[in-house]
Image: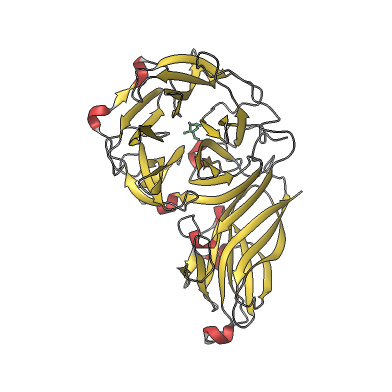
Amino acid sequence: MANPAIDKVFLADPAAHVFGERLYAYVSYDQPFTNTHDSMISYHCVSTDDLVNWVDHGQILALEYVPWALSHMWAIDCNFWQGNYYLVFCAFDKATGTFRTGLAVSNRPEGPFEDLGVIEGVEWGQDPSLFVDDVDGVLTPYLIWGGRGAITMAELNSDLRSVKVETITDLSGDLEGYEGPFLHKHAGTYYLTYPALDNEKWPQRMCFATAKSPLGPYVPGGVFIPEYQGNSGTIHGSMVEFKGQWYAFYHSAWVSGLSTSRSMMIDRFEYGSNGEILPFEPSREGVRAGANAYVAILDAAAGPTSGARRHGTFIETALEGFTGHGYVDGLTGQETGASVQFDWAGPDADAKTKVRVSVRYRNAGADFNGRVLFGNHLFYDGNQNQSYEQYINRGTVFANTQGQWRELEIGVLEIGPGSYRVRLSASHNLSKTLTAEAAGGIQLDYFKFEPID
Ligand code: FUB
């Protein structure tokens, strides 16, 4: 079964884009079985080059790294603009307790992203999406947002930090959109897709409207994903062309049965002879029959932005032949460590599954004795040594690799749904007084989590 496209982690509100040869989906994260959207505090990015083999890049932004945000990290989008990747996201702000739209930046599509503050000029900035129009090579950025039963859009200033207030357009007169708008362009026509209610009755259905210019006016075109079995009440999503085929991304409750633990879905769609989006029913096959593959590869260098921490270590990129985002260096003494955030789903709160944990590292010196700690993030209290629940391995030896990068399996975990942190540090048997050379030092590239069926 290929739908849900990813069933290992609860991902909602997918905003899909193609950057280079890969497709990236930017998604909000449902804390498993919390039964509320109020508990959403982070975002993920997942990517693929065939819609079958998925890499989860883990948390790309989390509440604790957005100083102005209070709660409710709901929907997001990302786009490429003037040499960088910009994430637009929403959260209740500390000052007013209402939704504001945030902006974050990365030089890589998979993040991690650094918060740049709120986008000025946007009221109740829930569910933002970032559309870059290309007319004869002239690029113009637009922000579209929704919530409280209305969809609004505006042109952005070129630094993306504010909208051009005089362009703010409320589309309530054109269509009855509820929230979650996404804009794409096909054959010169602008397609706004959005969830809407039918006579104020839930669940939401996915609808489209078309226009000849980004700010409208829009002509409603009807429902293209009707009510279906196992829907999650909401149906936020996006439309993307990948390798010559158009796909609709959205979410369902097909794994959990709950509207608050949602899973990412993908189906093909076609345009009709009049340019309309042809309606379809969510399919079990998705883009092909058979199971999808999922692996989480979590960049150790992304630790702090993604909700994890480093102690006494630092990020480097300088080693010859290293092609990743960055590696963690300085893993030499007892008090040092690098950690990442890891999220896991499941069909119900008690279900346990097995996950193989590996790390990619390099060692040009003496053997390094490492210990790997694993704990439930929800119980994290700021004191890592007390809050971590279990060791994956107390005494893994990270042997000399002759300076080559090597992936090393460090253990298999049996875990239930939740948010976890994994931390690698030097083993207790090292004395703080040892020099780096004597203790043995390694460079750490990433942590890898593979489900074992
Ligand atoms: O994911 C939280 C909220 O649910 C989104 O902001 C809405 O669009 C709906 O999908």
Quadrant holding the N terminus: top right
Task: Give the percent coordinates (x, y) of residue 132.
Answer: 38, 35
Q: Is residue 176 above or below residue 290?
A: above
Judging from the image, the colouring scheme is secondary structure
Residue 440: which quarter of the image? bottom right
Residue 432 in view in this figure: no
Residue 21 as seen in the image, left or right of residue 85: right
Residue 271: which quarter of the image? top right
Residue 429 in view in this figure: yes
Give 105 or 107, whichever is nearer the viewer. 107
Task: Give the percent coordinates (x, y) of residue 121.
Answer: 27, 35
Q: Is residue 67 above or below residue 200?
A: below
Give 327 or 138, whichever is nearer the viewer. 138
Residue 280 as seen in the image, left or right of residue 153: right
Residue 307 as seen in the image, left or right of residue 114: right
Task: Give the percent coordinates (x, y) of residue 266.
Answer: 61, 32
Q: Residue at 51% of width from left, 71% of height from top?
A: 320
Q: Residue at 44% of width from left, 15% of height from top?
A: 220
Q: Is residue 274 above or below residue 431?
A: above
Q: Is residue 271 above or below residue 343?
A: above
Give 131 or 440, whichever is nearer the viewer. 131
Residue 2 as seen in the image, left or right of residue 262: right
Task: Give the percent coordinates (x, y) of residue 313.
Answer: 48, 71
